[in-house]
Image (cartoon, grey):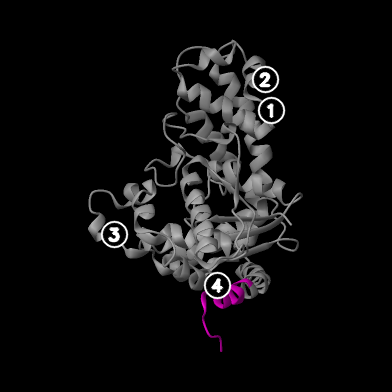
Amino acid sequence: MTRIFSGVQPTGNLHLGNYLGAIRNWVRLQNEYECIFCIVDMHAITLWQDPKELIRNTREVTAGMLAAGVDASRHMVFNQSMVPAHAQLAWILNCVARMGWLNRMTQFKDKAGKHKENASVGLFAYPNLMSADILAYRATHVPVGEDQKQHLELARDTAQKFNNDYGVDFFPLPEPLIFGTAARIMSLRDGTKKMSKSDESDYSRIAMQDDADAIALKIRKAKTDLEPLPAGVEGLEGRPEASNLLGIYAALSDLEKPEVVSRFAGRQFSEFKKELVDLAVAVLGPINAEMKRLMDDTTHLDAVLRSGAARANAIAAPILDQVYDIVGFLKP
């Protein structure tokens, strides 16, 4: 059986990059696979979080997923901390993975910066918890971006080492599902940087909760250059903002970028932006309205998460039981 596991941080302020780069892909995957979608609140606290904001952000991510079309009645949507197997298996994997493997993780170096001695142990061991997230369900595939491929490789190495150490063929080696570069969405203010919620300028990103007026204003203010749109994709060389806006149009319309470039060849940005506004509002408007409705019904969101957690636990608990037997733990 093919089983997908995918996790998302409850960072709040979901934006167009999150939707096109991840959430929309999950919606499509659920027609082909058994899907487990996890809001990874345990990962979130590797860096300090305001508790009230963490709760709100967890609900917001849930609302965004549901509004975009994730079907929580067919697949599991839950927050990580509700399923004990994540933490329990993570400790076992801490004892399997090697320090040298973790020392090579580039995301720890990026997040810890020059003061890694002050970083939490959780931030250092983050990849082992990520491995546990996947292996607790014996997931076969994981949708990953380029920046997560290293962590998935570590999960595969850890699974292989566990199997070898205990002489079993228990954990599958999860395979990556990597989506195309067309979904890589950059800042509206700087086409060389990824769209991010941490950017100081709110005009750098289109939030999934932006209404039509906000979307239109941000696209109109998006950075461009003085030249008309090129006749071919080779004309985008050295024009990151033009490339980004055309890429956004392509992703929202499900077209290949060369087709979009050809459609708007020679036209001015002002004319192109009007069409991009209409398209973005048509796609994101219904999601925006549904997110607002869901965020006003936190009782429903919490019920969705509890139901998803119960179903996830029904899969993970027996797998953890088998791991305990393999390792040699007595059970209550």
Residue linked to disc 4: 85
Q: Is residue 200 above or below residue 11?
A: above
Residue linked to disc 3: 119
The quarter holding residue 172 reads: bottom right
- Type of amino acid under label 3: Ala
Estimate the spatial distance between the alpha carbons at disc 4 and disc 1, rounded to whole Å: 41 Å
- Chief secondary structure of the magenta portion: helix
Q: Earlier in the sequence, mark 4 or mark 1?
A: 4
Contact between marks 2 and 1 (CB within 8 A): the answer is yes
- Type of amino acid under label 4: Ala
Estimate the spatial distance between the alpha carbons at disc 3 and disc 4, rounded to whole Å: 25 Å
Decide: few, some or many residues near mark 3? Use Cα within 10 Å; few <14, some 14-19, many ≥20.
some
Q: Which of marks 3 and 1 is nearer the N terminus?
A: 3
**Residue under the point 44% across and 70% down:** 91
Q: Which of marks 3 and 4 is nearer the N terminus?
A: 4
Residue linked to disc 1: 255
- Type of amino acid under label 1: Leu
Magenta residues, start to end: 319-332
- The percent coordinates of residue 147 (x first, y second) are 47, 43
Nearer the observer, disc 3 or disc 1? 3
